[in-house]
Image (tube, grey):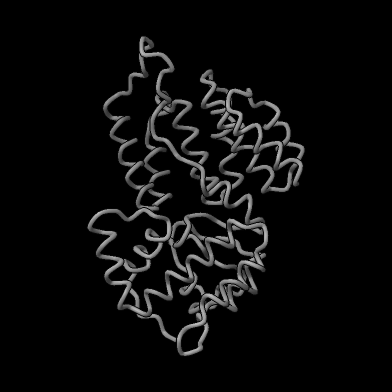
Amino acid sequence: MQLLLTDKEYDLARAYIKKELIGVALSDFESKLKNNEALQEEVIFQKSILSALRLDMVEEAMSKAKIDNVLEHKTEHPQYEFVRNNMQQARMENARSQRRIRRWVVTGLAAACILLVGIFGLRMNSNPILNNEIANLQVVFAPPEPEFEYVKGVDIPTEVQDKLDDAKNQYKDNDFDAALNTLNEIPVKDMKDYILLAKGTIYAKQGNNKESVEPLSKAAQSEDIVIKDEAHYILGLVYLRMENKTKAEKQFNKLSGENEKYRDEADRLLNKY
């Protein structure tokens, strides 16, 4: 069945399942959803993908999606078989273009990988749990708030703040490459540890493992314990995704213990992999 949806409708469906729509935007979308079968199919399909990424049982999740995606006229979602057959080797190849799965099917490039960047903004490899963990990382375009009110915050030059604001907006629009380009325009003398952390995290979320290592390693040398711990934790995730458990464990062992969530999650991942 041919899906006649616009790019904007695909984006709205994605935002809807991620609970990003609010107010008038949410009510308008739900109203349209009631009478648009193609949009209903898209929501069901994207929910099935999200579920598969979040579970350690991809095949079971996709089987459930197959059941959920059987339409009233007894046809299946046109991409179900494709996703089922390739989920284990899914790999996002081109974060720049933000293409969706369907475009890869049309061009024939989907034989090598499944491109999920249009839905989730990450480059996939064969480990959905690590991909999901990295996909859920927060990117902060500002230094950590001082722990005590009497401690003065970081002074940020106006031109640097402008770049940070631009990069933040580009990131919110899922234009990761534009956000990175904007951050790279910040002079070296102003490239503080929190900016390096943001760059490294974006690279990791894109699936650019090697590119993420340098900025994250520099951020891990920060004197700020929040930045330091986050950088070590993300580096550990990246090394695990690169199947280098030795380096991952080395990064996790450098966690200060101030953030118990990081420590507990690191122990769980090391035991699993």
Front residue (pair 84, 68): 68
Compared across the picture, whether 188 is left or right of 122 comes to: left
Q: Residue at x 27, y 69 (%)?
A: 31
Q: Residue at x 48, y 57 (%)?
A: 120
Residue 82 higher or lower than 251, as above or below: below
Q: Quadrant of the N terminus?
A: bottom left
Q: Residue at x 29, y 53 (%)?
A: 22
In the orientation shown, which residue stands out farthest toward the left? 24
Residue 200 higher or lower than 22, as above or below: above
Q: Position of residue 179 (x, y in %)?
A: 39, 45
Q: Position of residue 239 (x, y in %)?
A: 67, 42
Q: How many marks?
A: 0
Which quadrant of the structure image shows residue 42? Answer: bottom left
Which quadrant of the structure image shows residue 153? Answer: top left
Compared across the picture, whether 28 is left or right of 243 comes to: left
Q: Position of residue 228 (x, y in %)?
A: 56, 26
Front residue (pair 49, 184): 49
